[in-house]
Image (tube, rainbow, N blue to C red):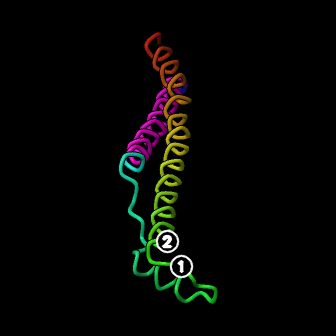
């Protein structure tokens, strides 16, 4: 009786872990495919650049810097999403053998 309860408890805990990992994986995939937009508008960036004491850039140079920073931010978000995705895959793969073993033991009994 206690052994059966133990196997059901192990199966429940590992199932909850795998569901949580699956949900987190879905969120990371969405972040990887469609990263959140860059929050800083070009006008805000330009005003910030113009307020600096050593400002001597043309609007084309400012726009180039802005676009470069925007692309760097998007790439950083994609990298973080990929990193989190790999970590969340572990939340699914690590509990899976314990779930399968508990299920087999429960079937034997």
Q: Quadrant of residue 23?
A: top left
What is the CA distance from the residue labelled 1 to the residue labelled 2? Answer: 6 Å
Image height check: is 66 above or below 74? Answer: below
Q: Is residue 19 magenta?
A: yes
User: Residue, x 53% and y 45% (percent of image)?
Assistant: 84
In what element is the residue under mark 1? loop
Magenta stretch prevailing secondary structure: helix
User: Residue, x 58% and y 84% (percent of image)?
Assistant: 55
Label 2 Cα neighbours within 10 Å, binned few <14 / some 14-19 / many ≥20: few
Please give the residue where the numbered disc 2 appears in the rendered image.
61
Q: Are marks 1 and 2 in contact (CB under 8 Å)?
A: yes
User: Residue, x 44% and y 77% (percent of image)?
Assistant: 59
User: Residue, x 47% and y 12% (percent of image)?
Assistant: 109
Residue 78 in percent (x, y) is at 48, 49
In what element is the residue under mark 2? helix
Residue 57 in percent (x, y) is at 53, 79
Please give the residue where the numbered disc 1 appears in the rendered image.
57
Q: Residue furthest top?
A: 108
Label 1 Cα neighbours within 10 Å, binned few <14 / some 14-19 / many ≥20: few
Q: Residue furthest right?
A: 54
Image height check: is 64 above or below 30? Answer: below
Observer-nearest residue: 63 or 40? 63
Q: Which residues are magenta?
A: 3-29
Left or right of residue 34: residue 14: right
Observer-nearest residue: 42 or 22? 42
């Amino acid at each position: 009786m206690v052994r059966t309860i133990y196997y059901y408890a192990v199966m429940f805990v590992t199932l909850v872990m795998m569901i949580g990992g699956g949900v987190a994986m879905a969120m990371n995939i969405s972040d990887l495919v469609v990263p959140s937009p860059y929050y800083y508008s070009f006008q805000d960036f330009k005003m910030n650049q113009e307020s600096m004491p050593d400002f001597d850039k043309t609007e084309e140079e400012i726009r180039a810097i802005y676009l470069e920073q925007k692309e760097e931010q998007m790439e950083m978000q994609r990298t973080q999403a990929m990193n989190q995705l790999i970590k969340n895959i572990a939340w699914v793969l690590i509990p899976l053998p314990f779930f399968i073993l508990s299920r087999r033991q429960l079937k034997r009994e």
